[in-house]
Image (tube, helix red, strand yellow):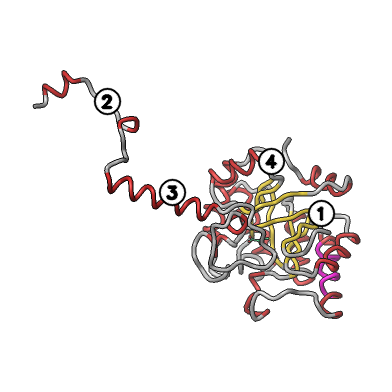
Amino acid sequence: MKNTVLTLQQAKKENKKITMLTAYDYSTARLMDEAGVNMLLVGDSLGNVVLGYEDTVSVTMEDMIHHGAAVARGAKNAMVVVDMPFMSYQTSVYDAVVNAGRLMKEARANAVKLEGGVNVAEQIKAIVAAGIPVVAHIGLTPQSVNVFGGHKVQGKTEAAAKKLIMDADAVQAAGAFAVVIEGVPARLAALITGRMDIPTIGIGAGAGCDGQVLVYQDMLGMYADFTPKFVKKFANVGEVMKAAFRQYIEEVNSGAFPSEEHCYAIDDEIMELLQ
Ligand code: KIV
Protein backbone atom coordinates (compact mmCIF):
# COMPACT_ATOMS: atom_id res chain seq x y z
CA MET A 1 0.00 0.00 0.00
CA LYS A 2 1.26 3.48 -0.90
CA ASN A 3 2.38 5.55 2.08
CA THR A 4 0.75 8.97 2.05
CA VAL A 5 0.24 11.91 4.37
CA LEU A 6 -3.01 10.24 5.44
CA THR A 7 -1.60 6.76 6.12
CA LEU A 8 1.25 8.28 8.16
CA GLN A 9 -1.14 10.38 10.23
CA GLN A 10 -3.25 7.25 10.75
CA ALA A 11 -0.13 5.38 11.93
CA LYS A 12 0.36 7.99 14.65
CA LYS A 13 -3.28 7.64 15.75
CA GLU A 14 -2.96 3.84 15.91
CA ASN A 15 0.38 3.97 17.73
CA LYS A 16 2.12 2.19 14.82
CA LYS A 17 5.79 3.05 14.32
CA ILE A 18 6.93 4.79 11.12
CA THR A 19 10.19 3.79 9.41
CA MET A 20 12.27 6.16 7.34
CA LEU A 21 15.73 5.65 5.80
CA THR A 22 17.81 7.92 3.63
CA ALA A 23 18.25 6.93 -0.02
CA TYR A 24 20.18 8.62 -2.81
CA ASP A 25 19.90 6.29 -5.82
CA TYR A 26 17.48 4.07 -7.76
CA SER A 27 18.71 0.58 -6.83
CA THR A 28 18.93 1.27 -3.09
CA ALA A 29 15.50 2.93 -3.18
CA ARG A 30 14.05 -0.19 -4.82
CA LEU A 31 15.52 -2.48 -2.16
CA MET A 32 14.18 -0.30 0.66
CA ASP A 33 10.79 0.01 -1.00
CA GLU A 34 10.57 -3.76 -1.49
CA ALA A 35 11.55 -4.28 2.18
CA GLY A 36 8.60 -2.11 3.19
CA VAL A 37 10.24 1.06 4.54
CA ASN A 38 7.48 3.71 4.91
CA MET A 39 9.43 6.81 3.89
CA LEU A 40 12.60 7.38 1.85
CA LEU A 41 14.44 10.58 2.67
CA VAL A 42 16.70 11.99 -0.01
CA GLY A 43 18.63 13.77 2.71
CA ASP A 44 21.17 16.50 2.12
CA SER A 45 23.41 14.11 4.09
CA LEU A 46 24.07 13.25 0.44
CA GLY A 47 26.78 15.89 0.85
CA ASN A 48 28.61 13.80 3.43
CA VAL A 49 27.99 10.17 2.53
CA VAL A 50 27.78 10.35 -1.28
CA LEU A 51 29.66 13.49 -2.33
CA GLY A 52 32.37 13.47 0.36
CA TYR A 53 31.90 17.00 1.74
CA GLU A 54 32.57 17.58 5.43
CA ASP A 55 29.07 19.05 5.96
CA THR A 56 25.80 19.65 4.09
CA VAL A 57 26.37 23.35 3.38
CA SER A 58 27.64 22.91 -0.21
CA VAL A 59 24.75 20.74 -1.42
CA THR A 60 22.81 22.37 -4.28
CA MET A 61 19.27 22.22 -5.65
CA GLU A 62 20.68 20.45 -8.72
CA ASP A 63 22.25 17.75 -6.49
CA MET A 64 18.91 17.20 -4.72
CA ILE A 65 16.92 17.07 -7.97
CA HIS A 66 19.38 14.64 -9.60
CA HIS A 67 19.35 12.18 -6.68
CA GLY A 68 15.70 12.79 -5.74
CA ALA A 69 14.54 11.83 -9.23
CA ALA A 70 16.57 8.59 -9.10
CA VAL A 71 15.04 7.63 -5.76
CA ALA A 72 11.52 8.53 -6.92
CA ARG A 73 11.94 6.16 -9.89
CA GLY A 74 12.75 3.33 -7.47
CA ALA A 75 9.97 3.92 -4.95
CA LYS A 76 6.58 2.29 -5.50
CA ASN A 77 5.00 2.36 -2.06
CA ALA A 78 7.38 4.43 0.05
CA MET A 79 6.78 8.15 0.36
CA VAL A 80 9.74 10.07 -1.11
CA VAL A 81 10.76 13.14 0.89
CA VAL A 82 13.46 15.38 -0.61
CA ASP A 83 15.52 17.77 1.52
CA MET A 84 15.61 21.46 0.66
CA PRO A 85 19.34 22.30 0.64
CA PHE A 86 21.03 25.15 2.50
CA MET A 87 19.99 28.60 1.17
CA SER A 88 17.13 27.24 -0.95
CA TYR A 89 14.49 28.45 1.58
CA GLN A 90 16.24 30.57 4.23
CA THR A 91 16.57 33.54 1.85
CA SER A 92 12.82 34.27 1.42
CA VAL A 93 9.33 32.79 1.45
CA TYR A 94 9.27 33.24 -2.34
CA ASP A 95 12.50 31.24 -2.82
CA ALA A 96 11.14 28.54 -0.50
CA VAL A 97 7.98 28.05 -2.58
CA VAL A 98 9.81 28.15 -5.92
CA ASN A 99 12.45 25.65 -4.80
CA ALA A 100 9.95 23.32 -3.10
CA GLY A 101 8.01 23.38 -6.38
CA ARG A 102 11.12 22.39 -8.33
CA LEU A 103 11.67 19.39 -6.05
CA MET A 104 8.08 18.28 -6.68
CA LYS A 105 8.12 18.86 -10.47
CA GLU A 106 11.68 17.92 -11.39
CA ALA A 107 12.53 15.28 -8.76
CA ARG A 108 8.93 14.00 -8.44
CA ALA A 109 9.14 14.20 -4.63
CA ASN A 110 6.02 13.41 -2.61
CA ALA A 111 7.02 15.93 0.07
CA VAL A 112 9.89 18.26 0.97
CA LYS A 113 11.81 18.63 4.24
CA LEU A 114 13.40 21.78 5.62
CA GLU A 115 15.31 22.60 8.79
CA GLY A 116 14.20 25.03 11.48
CA GLY A 117 11.27 25.90 13.75
CA VAL A 118 9.80 29.29 14.54
CA ASN A 119 12.29 30.90 12.11
CA VAL A 120 10.94 29.01 9.07
CA ALA A 121 7.23 28.88 10.01
CA GLU A 122 6.34 31.42 7.28
CA GLN A 123 8.13 29.35 4.66
CA ILE A 124 6.32 26.17 5.77
CA LYS A 125 2.95 27.94 5.69
CA ALA A 126 3.53 29.20 2.15
CA ILE A 127 4.83 25.88 0.80
CA VAL A 128 1.84 24.02 2.29
CA ALA A 129 -0.51 26.69 0.86
CA ALA A 130 1.01 25.92 -2.55
CA GLY A 131 -0.13 22.29 -2.16
CA ILE A 132 3.19 20.76 -1.16
CA PRO A 133 3.44 18.52 1.93
CA VAL A 134 6.21 19.54 4.33
CA VAL A 135 8.26 17.55 6.85
CA ALA A 136 9.90 19.89 9.36
CA HIS A 137 13.27 19.17 11.04
CA ILE A 138 14.11 20.56 14.49
CA GLY A 139 16.80 20.06 17.16
CA LEU A 140 20.24 19.38 15.75
CA THR A 141 19.78 20.81 12.27
CA PRO A 142 23.01 20.06 10.36
CA GLN A 143 22.72 23.05 7.99
CA SER A 144 23.28 25.24 11.10
CA VAL A 145 26.42 23.37 12.16
CA ASN A 146 28.42 26.61 11.98
CA VAL A 147 26.02 28.33 14.39
CA PHE A 148 26.02 25.36 16.80
CA GLY A 149 29.82 25.09 16.71
CA GLY A 150 29.63 21.39 15.75
CA HIS A 151 27.17 18.50 15.85
CA LYS A 152 25.96 19.11 19.43
CA VAL A 153 22.96 17.60 21.23
CA GLN A 154 20.22 20.26 21.47
CA GLY A 155 17.63 21.05 24.16
CA LYS A 156 19.64 20.15 27.25
CA THR A 157 19.02 23.31 29.29
CA GLU A 158 15.60 24.58 30.40
CA ALA A 159 15.75 27.48 27.94
CA ALA A 160 16.89 25.26 25.06
CA ALA A 161 14.21 22.65 25.84
CA LYS A 162 11.50 25.34 25.91
CA LYS A 163 12.77 26.72 22.59
CA LEU A 164 12.55 23.25 21.07
CA ILE A 165 8.95 22.85 22.27
CA MET A 166 8.13 26.24 20.71
CA ASP A 167 9.75 25.13 17.45
CA ALA A 168 7.68 21.93 17.44
CA ASP A 169 4.47 23.89 18.08
CA ALA A 170 5.36 26.41 15.37
CA VAL A 171 6.00 23.88 12.60
CA GLN A 172 2.80 21.99 13.44
CA ALA A 173 0.78 25.23 13.45
CA ALA A 174 2.37 26.21 10.11
CA GLY A 175 1.05 23.00 8.53
CA ALA A 176 3.94 20.51 8.53
CA PHE A 177 2.51 16.95 8.42
CA ALA A 178 5.48 15.39 10.25
CA VAL A 179 8.60 16.55 12.04
CA VAL A 180 12.08 15.04 12.27
CA ILE A 181 13.63 15.55 15.72
CA GLU A 182 17.41 15.14 15.67
CA GLY A 183 20.00 15.00 18.46
CA VAL A 184 17.72 15.68 21.42
CA PRO A 185 17.51 13.95 24.84
CA ALA A 186 15.12 10.99 24.64
CA ARG A 187 12.78 12.18 27.42
CA LEU A 188 12.40 15.62 25.84
CA ALA A 189 11.62 14.09 22.41
CA ALA A 190 9.04 11.80 24.07
CA LEU A 191 7.43 14.78 25.80
CA ILE A 192 7.21 16.67 22.49
CA THR A 193 5.82 13.58 20.74
CA GLY A 194 3.08 13.31 23.37
CA ARG A 195 2.04 16.96 22.80
CA MET A 196 1.84 16.75 19.02
CA ASP A 197 -0.89 15.71 16.60
CA ILE A 198 1.59 15.13 13.76
CA PRO A 199 4.08 12.22 13.77
CA THR A 200 7.59 12.80 15.13
CA ILE A 201 10.45 10.93 13.48
CA GLY A 202 13.53 10.67 15.64
CA ILE A 203 17.22 10.38 14.89
CA GLY A 204 19.28 10.41 18.06
CA ALA A 205 16.07 11.26 19.91
CA GLY A 206 15.16 7.97 21.59
CA ALA A 207 12.40 5.40 21.27
CA GLY A 208 9.57 7.68 22.34
CA CYS A 209 9.19 9.22 18.86
CA ASP A 210 6.48 7.99 16.48
CA GLY A 211 9.09 6.83 13.99
CA GLN A 212 12.81 6.53 13.37
CA VAL A 213 15.17 7.60 10.60
CA LEU A 214 18.80 6.65 9.96
CA VAL A 215 21.31 7.39 7.24
CA TYR A 216 21.56 4.07 5.42
CA GLN A 217 25.34 4.06 5.04
CA ASP A 218 25.55 4.46 8.84
CA MET A 219 23.14 1.63 9.63
CA LEU A 220 24.86 -0.67 7.11
CA GLY A 221 28.40 0.11 8.29
CA MET A 222 29.40 1.69 4.96
CA TYR A 223 30.57 5.12 6.18
CA ALA A 224 33.44 5.29 8.63
CA ASP A 225 34.29 9.03 8.59
CA PHE A 226 32.09 9.77 11.60
CA THR A 227 29.68 7.54 13.52
CA PRO A 228 27.36 9.30 16.00
CA LYS A 229 26.44 7.59 19.31
CA PHE A 230 22.84 7.03 18.15
CA VAL A 231 23.78 4.88 15.15
CA LYS A 232 23.18 1.14 15.37
CA LYS A 233 24.94 -0.94 12.72
CA PHE A 234 22.32 -3.43 11.51
CA ALA A 235 24.88 -5.05 9.18
CA ASN A 236 28.54 -4.66 8.27
CA VAL A 237 28.05 -4.22 4.55
CA GLY A 238 31.22 -2.11 4.28
CA GLU A 239 33.34 -5.15 5.26
CA VAL A 240 31.36 -7.42 2.90
CA MET A 241 31.99 -4.93 0.06
CA LYS A 242 35.71 -4.65 0.80
CA ALA A 243 36.07 -8.45 0.91
CA ALA A 244 34.29 -8.72 -2.46
CA PHE A 245 36.48 -5.96 -3.98
CA ARG A 246 39.64 -7.76 -2.75
CA GLN A 247 38.44 -11.11 -4.16
CA TYR A 248 37.68 -9.42 -7.50
CA ILE A 249 41.23 -8.01 -7.65
CA GLU A 250 42.69 -11.44 -6.84
CA GLU A 251 40.58 -13.27 -9.42
CA VAL A 252 41.29 -10.75 -12.20
CA ASN A 253 45.00 -10.95 -11.41
CA SER A 254 45.01 -14.77 -11.33
CA GLY A 255 42.79 -15.15 -14.43
CA ALA A 256 40.10 -16.99 -12.44
CA PHE A 257 37.63 -14.29 -13.52
CA PRO A 258 36.04 -14.22 -16.03
CA SER A 259 35.55 -17.99 -16.36
CA GLU A 260 33.63 -19.68 -19.18
CA GLU A 261 30.24 -19.20 -17.55
CA HIS A 262 30.72 -15.43 -17.74
CA CYS A 263 31.77 -15.41 -21.43
CA TYR A 264 29.82 -15.28 -24.71
CA ALA A 265 30.29 -18.17 -27.18
CA ILE A 266 30.89 -18.00 -30.95
CA ASP A 267 30.63 -20.89 -33.49
CA ASP A 268 33.92 -22.69 -34.40
CA GLU A 269 33.18 -22.23 -38.15
CA ILE A 270 33.07 -18.45 -37.76
CA MET A 271 36.35 -18.46 -35.85
CA GLU A 272 37.97 -20.60 -38.59
CA LEU A 273 36.95 -18.04 -41.20
CA LEU A 274 38.84 -15.42 -39.24
CA GLN A 275 42.20 -17.32 -39.10
O1 KIV B 1 19.96 14.75 5.54
C1 KIV B 1 19.59 13.81 6.26
O2 KIV B 1 19.97 12.65 6.07
C2 KIV B 1 18.70 14.11 7.35
C3 KIV B 1 18.50 13.04 8.37
C4 KIV B 1 19.69 12.99 9.24
C5 KIV B 1 17.25 13.24 9.13
O3 KIV B 1 18.18 15.19 7.43
Q: In this rendered view, identify the residue nearer to me: 165 or 64.
A: 165
- Residue 55, by quadrant, is bottom right
Q: Is residue 183 left or right of residue 268?
A: right
Q: Position of residue 128 (x, y in %)?
A: 76, 55
Cα separation, mark 3 vs mark 4, equals: 27 Å
Residue at 89%, 47% (x, y): give it.
13
Which disc number belongs to residue 244?
3
Q: CA distance from mark 4 to mark 1?
A: 17 Å
Residue beneath disc 2:
265
Query: Which quarter of the image is occupied by the C terminus?
Result: top left
Give left or right: position of 138 versus 108. right
Which of the two discs, 1 and 3, sits closer to the camera?
A: 3
Q: Residues within 10 Å of mark 4 (few under 14, many from 20)?
A: some
Amino acid type, mark 4: Gly
Q: Nearer the viewer, mark 3 or mark 4?
A: 3
- The residue beneath circle 4 is 36
Residue 210: which disc? 1
Kindly state the secondary structure of the residue where label 1 is placed.
Answer: loop
Tell me which amino acid carries mark 2.
Ala
Give how far apart the Cα atoms at labels 1 and 3 are: 38 Å
Q: Position of residue 258 (x, y in %)?
A: 31, 38
| SS class, disc 3 | helix
The image quarter in which residue 178 lies: bottom right
